[in-house]
Amino acid sequence: MMTKKDFKELANMCAEIDGANAGVREYVIDFLCKFCYRNNNRFDEDRFREWVKRKVNGKSTKGLG
């Protein structure tokens, strides 16, 4: 089963997708959200998306994890 640590790492990888490829990033996020939920039904998609958004915008992720 995937853990919060795994989810954070996946979110960090999503945030590293080049901004010019925002559509690709969104596609990957959608896919990973479904995958993560199937692996752990406690997965929080909103928190995952917020983590990626903050990382992309260079903001702190404090309070999310």
Image: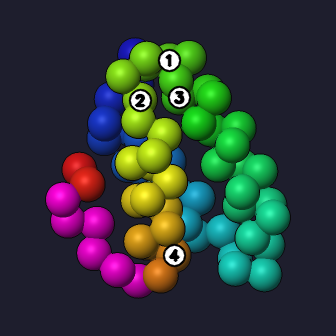
Query: What secondary structure is the stretch in magenta mostly built from?
Result: loop
Q: Nearer the viewer, mark 3 or mark 2?
A: 2
Q: Circles 1 and 2: CB distance less than 8 Å?
A: yes
Residue 5, horizontal then vertical, whole percent: 31, 41
Give the residue type at disc 4. Answer: Val
Alpha carbon separation for disc pair 1 and 2? 8 Å
Mark number displayed over residue 39: 1
Q: Residues within 10 Å of mark 2 (few under 14, many from 20)?
A: some
Considering only order in the chain, which callout, 2 or 3, is on the residue closer to the N terminus?
A: 3
Q: Is residue 51 above or below residue 43?
A: below
Distance from the alpha carbon under mark 4 to that under mark 1: 25 Å
Tag 1 and tag 3, C-beta contact below 8 Å: yes
Q: Crowding at label 4, few (<14), some or many (≥20) Cα neighbours within 10 Å? A: some
Q: Secondary structure at mark 1?
A: helix
* Highlighted magenta segment, given as a residue range: 58-63
Residue beneath disc 2: 43
Quadrant position of residue 6: top left
Q: How is the image coloured?
A: rainbow
- The secondary structure type at the circle numbered 4 is helix
Q: Is residue 42 magenta?
A: no
- According to the picture, the residue beneath numbered tag 3 turns out to be 36
Do residues under tags 4 and 1 come within 8 Å of each other at their CB atoms?
no
